[in-house]
Amino acid sequence: VNVPLKDPINGSLGSWVQYQRRSRYLSKPNNSSTSKSKSATSSASKLTRDQVRKLEDLGFVWDLKQHRWMERYRELVDFVEKYGHCHVPSNGSIGKDDVDINDDGIDYKSLQAWCGTQRHLFRLKYKLDRTGK
């Protein structure tokens, strides 16, 4: 379950969802002792275990960054299963046969950008690991 912050259909539901995520984050032991104001970490802002369980039973998305990463990863798995490689092109064609990847109605531009970001992050980490920094 993932509701946009500004959802035109459900109005304030997006704000409520964001509040639930923040409340759960504040409920974690390592996060409540940080430099947040006392009112931001009050027990009134924390979710109970039962509330967390109920939201999880619905498939509630707690970590949007991880959720989006997994969505792109699944798209890449599908791409690899279909084309046999993970070199997602930006020009709309694959391989020497210049096969149109949009023949199935899927736009791979965002997947290609995500793959580029993953490669960039890998290079940054590899460079840092090799220099010992």
Image: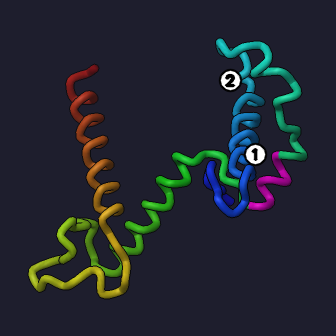
Residue 44 lies in what quarter of the image? top right
Q: Which mark is residue 129?
A: none
The relative height of residue 120 versus residue 84 in the rendered view (above or below) is above
Q: Nearer the viewer, mark 1 or mark 2?
A: 1
Would you say residue 54 sits in the magenta stretch? yes
The relative height of residue 30 versus residue 48 in the rendered view (above or below) is above
- Residue shown at the point (23%, 66%) measured from the top left: 87
Residue topped by disc 2: 31
Residue topped by disc 1: 16
Looking at the picture, how far across and down is residue 29, in whole percent? 74, 24
Residue closest to the eye, 127 or 20: 20
Earlier sequence position, callout 1 versus callout 2: 1
Which residue type does callout 2 highlight? Asn
Which stretch is magenta?
52-58
Looking at the picture, how far across and down is residue 88, in whole percent? 25, 67
CA neighbours of label 1 inside 10 A, class few (<14), some (14 to 19), many (20+): few
Residue 25 lies in what quarter of the image? top right
The relative height of residue 74 versus residue 101 in the rendered view (above or below) is above
Residue closest to the eye, 123 or 18: 18
Would you say residue 119 sits in the magenta stretch? no
CA neighbours of label 2 inside 10 A, class few (<14), some (14 to 19), many (20+): few
Which residue type does callout 1 highlight? Trp
